[in-house]
Amino acid sequence: MSDYTEAIKRLFPRGLAWDNNPIKDALAAAFAKTLKALDLDAKALFLEKFATKQKQSLGEWENQLALPDRFSIEDDTLSNRGFAVVAKNHSKGGQSKISFHDLAKAYGFKIQIITFPALICGVAVVGETVGAAPLEATIKILDYADEAIHVGEYIVGSNLPTDEKLTNFIGACNRKIAAYGKLHFVTEV
């Protein structure tokens, strides 16, 4: 008899009012199968709190975030799809420096923001861009050269995994910037 069956049988009432016949055991065993399935689903759902490890709710997250989009990579493994969900969800943040640093961290990069305009409230009117010029920023990716080339691991013409990460990171940053903004990316070599 399983632990689930025993747990359910302990919940049944005791005493003269409850008949102790084999139907009770069959009923407990039937409920135990459902309880075990529910318990396993709850455990799997709890483990999926990390989007990069999702399996059951990944499709729902992708629908909610309109993925795949034009910045999505073509490799549609579960881990890459989960990574895209995390990245797009992080990219929903503001256009502050810290939000770009958080986005870079989600992709595994360290960045330095070289130029970033200050937001000045009350300067623009409705329909105009904020400030005198469009939002323009320069982001330097500090650790790109460390990961870019691994000698002997790739064949000629293959894409490096870091190139996909970089492409996705740049796409996520471009989604954060408003339509009137422009980002420049510099890699350290």
Image (cartoon, helix red, strand yellow):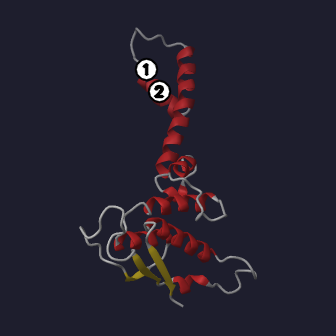
Q: Position of residue 122 (x, y in %)?
A: 23, 67
Residue 1 visible to the viewer: no
Q: Name the amino acid, label 1.
A: Phe
Alpha carbon of mark 2 to alpha carbon of mark 1: how far? 7 Å
51 to the left or right of 118: right
Residue 142 percent across, percent down from the top left: 47, 84
Q: Viewed as shown, does residue 187 lie left or right of 132?
A: right
**Observer-nearest of 138 and 166:** 138
The furthest residue to the right: 156
Above or below: residue 164 compared with residue 69: below
| Badge number at residue 8 | 2
Q: Is residue 187 above or below residue 57?
A: below
The image shows residue 77, relative to residue 47, as above or below, that is: below
Q: Position of residue 168 (x, y in %)?
A: 56, 69
Residue annotated with mark 1: 12
Q: Give the farthest residue toward the bottom.
A: 189
**Residue 118 point in image, percent of width and height:** 30, 76
